[in-house]
Each structure stands twice: as C-alpha cells, then as structure tokens.
Image (cartoon, helix red, strand yellow):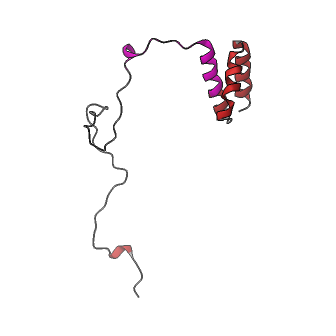
Amino acid sequence: MTPWNNENLSSGAYADPYAAPELSDSPWPTPVHVGDDLDYFLPPPNPAERLSRVLAPRDERRLALNVALTAAGIPPMPGDRAVIDQLSALPADVNTVLQRWLHHAL
C-alpha cells in the first residue's frame, strides 16, 4: 500500500480562496430579473419616500423597553406583552429608570 502524498498529484492548479472579484463602478448591482435565484443588495433608502408618521409616546416607550430587555439578555416572552404594555403606559420617567436599570445590569 502506498501512503498518500499531495506532492504526487498531477494537477498543479491553484485557486486563491481569498481572491476578490473585480469591483464595478457602482457598488449597487442591478436588480435581479424574475426567476433568477441570485441575491443582491437593496439600494439605500430615499429620505423623501419615508412615511411621515410619528409613533405615539406609549409605543416608543414599549419599543424602547423591548430593546432594553433584549440587549440586557432578557428577551421578552410572548406572555410578557401585557406587562410590557402596562409598563409602557406609565409615565416616561418610570420607563427611563427601567431602561437605566437594565442598561446597568449589563
């Protein structure tokens, strides 16, 4: 039995795994046609096309509390929604203190 040795391979082909493709002029490729299975980057958002809606303060506090809990490693469970909604109904000072406590828990 002959031991395996990579020096005896007849193919001398070499592929650089870190080779980068040639960059085009535009960093945003053209959208893919329907039926293609390719992925592409979306263009950056146009500020003129943004919706002009403002969240209610209670909704802003609810979202901020969800973010603070998740960042602290305490992702809210589905059953926690009612409690988070009740905490969000409290004054903004209470929500700010809760977020500060969670931030310092990190």
Q: Position of residue 44 (x, y in %)?
A: 37, 25
Residue 71: horizontal and vertical position, in percent? 64, 32
Q: What residue is rendered at 60% in x and 17% in y?
A: 59
Magenta range is 46-66
Q: Residue at x 58, y 12 (%)?
A: 56
* Magenta stretch encompasses residue 79: no
- Pick the residue in front: 73 or 13: 73
Magenta includes 50? yes
Q: Left or right of 45: which side holds 64? A: right
User: What is the total number of numbered labels drawn onto the structure image?
Assistant: 0
Q: Is residue 29 above or below residue 48?
A: below
Seen from the viewer's position, the closer of residues 10 and 58 is 58
Task: Decide if residue 88 is on the left or right side of residue 29.
Answer: right
> Which residue is the extreme one toward the bottom?
1
| Vertical relation: 62 (above or below) 8 | above
**Can residue 76 be seen here?**
no
**Residue drawn at (31%, 31%) of the image:** 28
Picture coordinates of residue 24 (x, y %)? 26, 36
Q: Main secondary structure of the magenta part?
A: helix
Asked which quadrant contains residue 65, the reply is top right
Image quarter in which the N terminus is found: bottom left
**Residue 35 seen in render:** yes
Q: Horizontally, is 9 left or right of 80 in the view?
A: left
Residue 99 appears in which quarter of the rendering? Answer: top right
